[in-house]
Amino acid sequence: MSVPPEQELVDALDEEGNVIGTVSRAEMRQGNLWHRSVFIVVVNDADEILVHRRASWKDVWPDRWDIAVGGVVTAGEAWELAAARELAEEIGVSVELGYLGEGIYADDDVREVARVYHARSDGPFSFDDGEITEAAWVPMAQLRDWLATRPVCPDSIALVLPRLDAP
């Protein structure tokens, strides 16, 4: 039996990204504590990016669109394992991951140290965990225009979008 998401343990970090303790996900969200997270950009062979809308029950930014799957890294979990786990949980695939970079993001809702990965897959995808309520393919060349007309998760815009523009 799995642990409810709010009871998952995560590493609490200081502002430099050092682990300073372990807290529940609920405590991390309630205190807006620094934590680790992963983002995985999924692109198909037609050079389209998989975008998705988050479920209404999500603990942060419900019903918003996102340009990467991913989530919170659990306590003691390796970055790459967290990225592979999130990819499998959220869209039901297991493919090779490439590393795009690392960064920090902070606002009134989230404070995170994140790593960004990319994956190439045409699917098929399954959204069995219910975190994704809608998904679509958007041509990379049209992504910015597509994003301009929708509410989107600000952390993925700040951390992922610049890495998509890199050569």
Image (tube, helix red, strand yellow):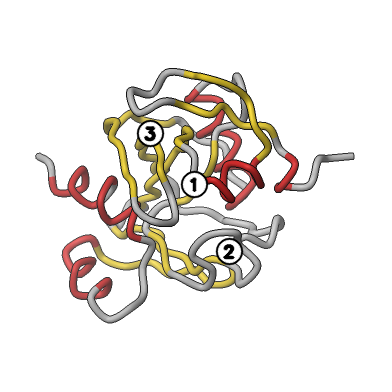
Query: Which residue corresponds to mark 3?
Result: 113
- Amino acid under disc 2: Ile
* Lower position in the chain sequence, tag 2 or tag 1: 1
Residue 36 or residue 166, whichever sits in front:
36
The structure residue drawn at horizontal position 53% and vertical position 29%, both measured from the top left corner, is 12
Secondary structure at badge 3 equals strand
The structure residue drawn at horizontal position 37% and vertical position 53%, both measured from the top left corner, is 44
- Amino acid under disc 1: Asn
Compared with 17, 48 (above or below) is: below
- Amino acid under disc 3: Val
* Lower position in the chain sequence, tag 2 or tag 3: 3
Quadrant the N terminus occupies: top right
Residue 32: mark in rendering: 1
Residue 11: mark in rendering: none
Instruction: Measuring from the top left, give residue 5's x and y in whole percent.
Output: 71, 47
Mark 1 Cα shell of 10 Å, populated few (<14), some (14-19), many (≥20): some
Secondary structure at badge 1 equals loop
Mark 3 Cα shell of 10 Å, populated few (<14), some (14-19), many (≥20): many
Instruction: Measuring from the top left, give residue 167's x and y in whole percent.
Output: 9, 39
Q: Which residue occupies the extreme front position in the image? A: 31
Of circles 3 and 1, the one toward us is 1
Name the image quarter holding residue 66: bottom left
Mark 3 and mark 1: Cα distance apart in space: 13 Å
